[in-house]
């Protein structure tokens, strides 16, 4: 089983290197993302022909994701990029969760070296960061998600739909917090808390969330957005018991349709088939 410290830290995006004067300098290799067919740059991820963002008219900037060797808080961004047909590179720092009790200097020395070098200063000495165009450094996983969503036309068609996309992702964040509270209970209480979460809290929450979803197969309007991607990633990767989580959604046809719209997309299928399998 994963240590609570490791899963909480990754889930919150708050892994912070402890002070270590003896950490050897190290650099992680930048690995290319799975090959994505970037056909038809002017097409939206949903396949409809819409005016592309300004950057598409030229060449999209290089993208380098710096994060742990994990799905963690960067997987929504990776999925959004895959959906948009945009290639990216990665620096993936190894994380040995079995050594977390010994501190990050032992569990993730290459990450600590990156902290010491200053390359994570934009995120207050934490991962993740994303380097765009070799110059601009982005910080905070949710800000990064929204940056890519705007870049890829996944943030709605106007300010009103963008606010709806934003609200949905915040609802999902609330759901994750409820899950972590149940998961963080101790001893026998944890088993009871998780049973209550999957049996009552999650189904009730999804019934309320269903009311916020537009008809037509997508969370907001008639197009794929960050909201759909967030829903898909959460119910694919986030819960320890994905079967129970999926069962809780069975009475929510609009949410199911939005989930299926992402899962069935050819670029997402291609990405999921080729993505690296990691413990977290």
Image: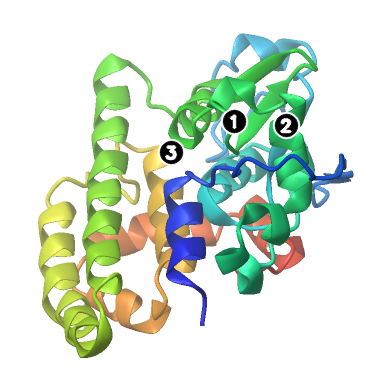
Mark 3, residue position: 226
Report the residue at 51% width, 83% height from top.
1
Nearer the observer, disc 2 or disc 3? 2
Front-most of residues 9 and 159: 9
On the image, the x and y values in percent for residue 24 come to 86, 44
Alpha carbon separation for disc pair 2 and 3: 33 Å
Give the number of the disc on residue 125: 1
Are the residues tagged 1 and 2 within 8 Å (C-beta)? no
Whether residue 179 is situated above or below residue 69 in the rendered picture? below
On the image, the x and y values in percent for residue 227 come to 37, 42
Nearer the observer, disc 1 or disc 2? 2
Mark 2, residue position: 116
Report the residue at 52% width, 23% height from top.
147
Q: Is residue 88 visible?
A: no
Whether residue 88 is situated above or below residue 96 in the rendered picture? above
On the image, the x and y values in percent for residue 72 come to 54, 54
- Which part of the image, by quadrant, shows the C terminus? bottom right
Q: Is residue 189 left or right of residue 148?
A: left
Question: What secondary structure is found at the residue carrying circle 2?
Answer: helix
């Amino acid at each position: 089983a994963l240590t609570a410290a490791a899963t909480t830290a990754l889930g919150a995006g708050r892994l912070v290197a402890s002070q270590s004067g003896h950490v050897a300098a190290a650099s992680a290799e930048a690995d290319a993302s799975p090959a994505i067919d970037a056909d038809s740059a002017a097409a939206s991820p949903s396949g409809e022909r819409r005016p592309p963002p300004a950057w598409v008219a030229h060449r999209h900037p290089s993208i380098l994701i710096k994060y742990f060797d994990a799905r963690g808080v960067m997987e929504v961004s990776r999925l959004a990029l895959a959906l948009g047909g945009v290639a990216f590179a990665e620096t993936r720092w190894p994380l040995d969760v079995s050594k977390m009790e010994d501190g990050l200097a032992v569990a993730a020395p290459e990450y600590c070296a990156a902290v010491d070098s200053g390359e994570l200063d934009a995120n207050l000495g934490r991962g993740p960061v994303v380097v765009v165009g070799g110059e601009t450094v982005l910080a905070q996983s949710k800000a990064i998600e929204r940056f890519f969503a705007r870049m890829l036309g996944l943030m709605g068609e106007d300010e009103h739909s963008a606010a709806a996309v934003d609200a949905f992702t915040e609802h999902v964040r609330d759901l994750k917090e409820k899950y972590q509270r149940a998961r963080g209970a101790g001893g026998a209480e944890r088993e009871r808390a998780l049973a209550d979460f999957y049996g009552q809290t999650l189904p009730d929450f999804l019934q309320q969330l269903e009311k916020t979803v537009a008809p037509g197969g997508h969370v907001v309007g008639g197009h794929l957005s960050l909201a759909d991607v967030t829903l898909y990633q959460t119910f694919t990767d986030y819960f320890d018991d994905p079967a129970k989580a999926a069962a809780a959604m069975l009475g929510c046809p609009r949410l199911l349709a939005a989930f299926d719209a992402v899962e069935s997309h050819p670029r997402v299928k291609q990405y999921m088939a080729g993505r690296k399998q990691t413990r977290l």
